[in-house]
Image (spheres, rainbow, N blue to C red):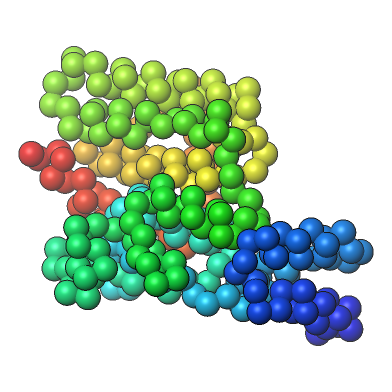
Amino acid sequence: MSTARVHQTATVVSALSSNVKHRVSFRRNYSVLSTRRGFNRNFFLSLVASVSDPIEVCVKASTTFPNKPGDCPFCQRVLLTLEEKHLQYDMKLVDLSNKPEWFLKISPEGKVPVVKFGEKWVPDSDVITLSIEEKFPYPSLATPPEKSSVGSKIFSSFIGFLKSKNPGDGTEQALLDELSSFNDYLKENGPFINGEKVSAADLSLGPKLYHLEIALGHYKKWSIPESLSFVKSYMKAIFSKDSFIKTRALPEDVVTGWRPKVVS
């Protein structure tokens, strides 16, 4: 390690001290250090993660491959947030077809994801990701309120089309309308929902588009039209991120997971 890096390490550790988890102190230390010559933002964030206690998170387990997360886009959203925040976490994989007693004690309704903050287990990906943003504000993933609902109707439109057994019921067109609207938005405001940088809204929508691509491709032989080039570029950019590749479900799990919606 270079002399400069050793000095930077000592400086950062001193600045963080024992209260790295406290938002105000973290913001002040980050702001002060970021003005110094030679400050390495990624190094600072990786060091923060290394001195923080791992965050415990329960997610759905794969049904086809051991030690892999399963086909829950809401679980992936939480894992993506932790990855993009450079936070250490302890991932507990839960077999939802045979829920263990320890899991039902912390999640009585048997739902995932759930994350432990302090001594409390917190459910719901909306609540969890907002809590992570509040407790660990750097790097920021906040999406401006006026942009937070962009693309939010795509997932429900996808489910409607996937479940449909009547080609003329309008569900395909409803999905195309939502995707076209999103394509127009990205054309004017992209490449991501909040412009140049990935934000929380992308980490929510990305896993849902991944499920859309796999499930509709398998069950309906359907794919997003080439004319929606900004949507396709958006998906490629999100899906190719290291954090996404690390946390995504296996395609076979996605196919299996949506089968009840198709055959019911």
Residue furthest to the right in view is 37
Q: Residue at 34% of width from left, 72% of height from top?
A: 92
190 to 47, vertically: above or below? above
Residue under the image location 13 percent in, 68 percent down: 98
Q: Is residue 249 above or below residue 58?
A: above
Q: Who is closer to the viewer here, 83 or 57?
A: 57
263 lies left or right of 171: left
- Residue 69 visible in this rendered orientation of the protein: no
x and y percent of residue 205 in the render? 44, 40
Above or below 254: residue 147: above
Left or right: residue 167 versus residue 15 is left
Closer-to-camera residue (98/64)? 98
Q: Residue furthest left?
A: 264
At x 55%, y 28%, the residue is 146
- Which quadrant, please, contains the C terminus? top left
Residue at point 54% right, 37% down?
Answer: 234
Number of numbered markers: 0
Q: Position of residue 81 (x, y in %)?
A: 50, 56
- The answer to which quarter of the image holds residue 33 is bottom right
Question: Left of 208 or right of it: where is 97?
Answer: left
Question: For residue 144, which quarter of the picture?
Answer: top right
Compared with 13, 242 (above or below) is above
Please identify the quadrant where the N terminus is shown.
bottom right
| Residue 253: image location, x then y, percent | 26, 56
Q: Looking at this view, is 186 or 5 the one in front? A: 5
Residue 168 in the image: state x and y as whole percent: 18, 15
Does any portion of residue 23 appear in the rendered image?
A: yes
